[in-house]
Amino acid sequence: MTLDRRCELVEQFRDELGLNACLLAMGISKGTWYPRQKRPKGPSPKDQELVDAIREVIEEHPEYGYRKLKPDVEEILGEAVNHKRLRRVLKQWGLGLRRLVSNFTPSPIRTLLDEAAGVLNLVKGWDPAPLELLSVDFTEIHFDEGRRKAHLIALIDVGSRMICGWAVGRSADRALALRSWKKARDTLAEMGRTMAGMVVHSDQDSVFTSYAWLRELMVTDSVIVSFSERGAKDNPWIESFWSHFKRENASLLIEASSLEELEEIIARRMAYYNRSRRHESLGQQPPVEFLIREGIIEETLSAA
């Protein structure tokens, strides 16, 4: 085995087994090891995967230290990450907190959005047909008599007012957004529809401009993304829904004593909203009934 390969193995297992034990096992003296570490080089292939995952999380959560970084990084990599290795890579490759790094470089996505300012809103003045445009955003929900709060995200079909997907959790983060997206995908699959070609409109929150969210929408599901450029004013459909939803269900939501109970209440109200609540814009029909009568979905198919 070459010296380079033995040094790679030491680098790979040093955080887990300790540097001295690894050097002894590979037959490498400290006099050989330390001078080699001073050579300018990039991360190893294994460390590069970790560096890329760290950068993705930091872009979305620049305030995170290594303890909060760890679970998100592990989620991206699909494997456990030793905390010593994580701290070493953070230090070794200068991946400090954004607020402490004066020369922080914006992500390519953020740079692209800044350059495209003025043409990011693809839905202005559009009157979409059912299942052409989804509007998405987060809102806060207070429960347990106001002592606690959760975050709720929903994707509403502008043309039919149907809630295609939603999720509730403790944080308005990427994981929660992707849960709601999976539910929307499953809902449309039950209708015999795919996401391909649909437009998803959101604000420019860090979750909706993250690599993971955009990769899932644009690469996995071939969706077109559109962004608000004037905040809530450019995304009136979801804002209108939140206004009605929270006003009509305030007493139910505030009485939930746990996140699990809150989720059960929201599930029932979302089903009511889709199947029973009448909408003036739909000819006083609920969303599911409207879609059935328009021949867009079959009566035998369920909708969340």
Image (cartoon, rainbow, N blue to C red):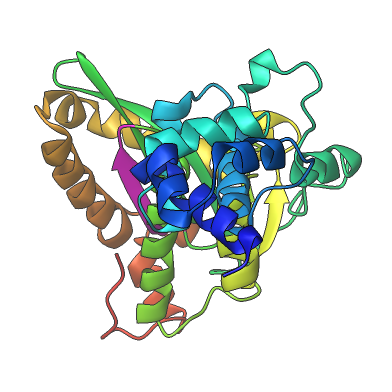
Residue visible at 73% across and 57% down in the picture = 126
The spot of residue 213 in percent (x, y) is 56, 53
Give left or right: position of 227 versus 147.
Answer: right
Give left or right: position of 100 versus 299.
Answer: right
Q: Quadrant of the N terminus?
A: bottom right
Does 11 appear above or below 187? above
Residue visible at 34% across and 37% down in the picture = 245
Does residue 89 appear anywhere in the picture?
yes
Q: Which residues are magenta?
A: 161-170
Q: Quadrant of the C terminus?
A: bottom left
The spot of residue 13 in percent (x, y) is 43, 50
Give left or right: position of 3 versus 68.
Answer: right
The spot of residue 31 in percent (x, y) is 62, 37
Residue closer to the observer: 18 or 147? 18
Does 273 appear in magenta?
Answer: no
Residue 234 sits in which quadrant?
top right
Residue visible at 48% across and 23% down in the picture = 65
